[in-house]
Amino acid sequence: MNEYTRTHARPGQASADTSSIGLITQLTGEISTLVRKEVALAKSELTHSFKSAKSGLVGLVAGGLLLFAGFLVLLWAAVLGLSEIMAPWLAALIVGGVVLLIGLVMVQSGKHKLDPAAFKPTHTANSLHKDRNALRGATT
């Protein structure tokens, strides 16, 4: 600010230096707030992803147990089949097959929930992309 501007400034009119400093201070505060909110969003998404992974893991374990139970029933059916060669082993074979199918469905469902794509913080990435575009627009 030169001497003429300092002595001839109208009362109540902010000087260019003061308004620039104020804008920079305001921008710094807003960027700080933005970063805090982005971190909170990422934290929230990761928490959700870990809960989903936990659910997937429970599904895998339950499916594995059902597969094991189905395998035991099939073994029992084979034993009955060899000892009787008639209807009792056929019934056990059908039950074992159904249990195996249910277990396979549960394992596939749990495996899908553990897909690495489910752990991407997509909302945070989209928000950061929007923020970057907004900042580019504000600086041009």
Image (cartoon, grey):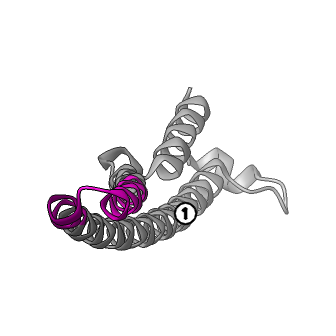
- Identify the residue at image location x=60%, y=30%: 137
78 in the magenta segment: yes
The residue closer to the viewer here, 48 or 135, is 48
Q: Amino acid at mark 1?
A: Thr
Quarter of the rendering containing residue 53: bottom left
Give the image location of residue 73, x and y in percent. Answer: 27, 68
Which portion, as a residue range, is magenta?
77-103
30 in the magenta segment: no
From this view, report whether residue 54 is shown above or below residue 119. Answer: below
From this view, report whether residue 61 is shown above or below residue 30. Answer: below
* Secondary structure mostly taken by the magenta-highlighted segment of the chain: helix
* Element class at badge 1: helix
- Identify the residue at image location x=50%, y=38%: 129
In the figure, is residue 113 to the left or right of 84? right
Give the image location of residue 66, x and y in percent. Answer: 33, 69
- Identify the residue at image location x=54%, y=55%: 24
Give the image location of residue 43, x and y in percent. Answer: 43, 70
- Pick the quarter of the image with the C terminus: top right
The residue that disc 1 covers is: 25
The residue closer to the viewer here, 78 or 3, is 78
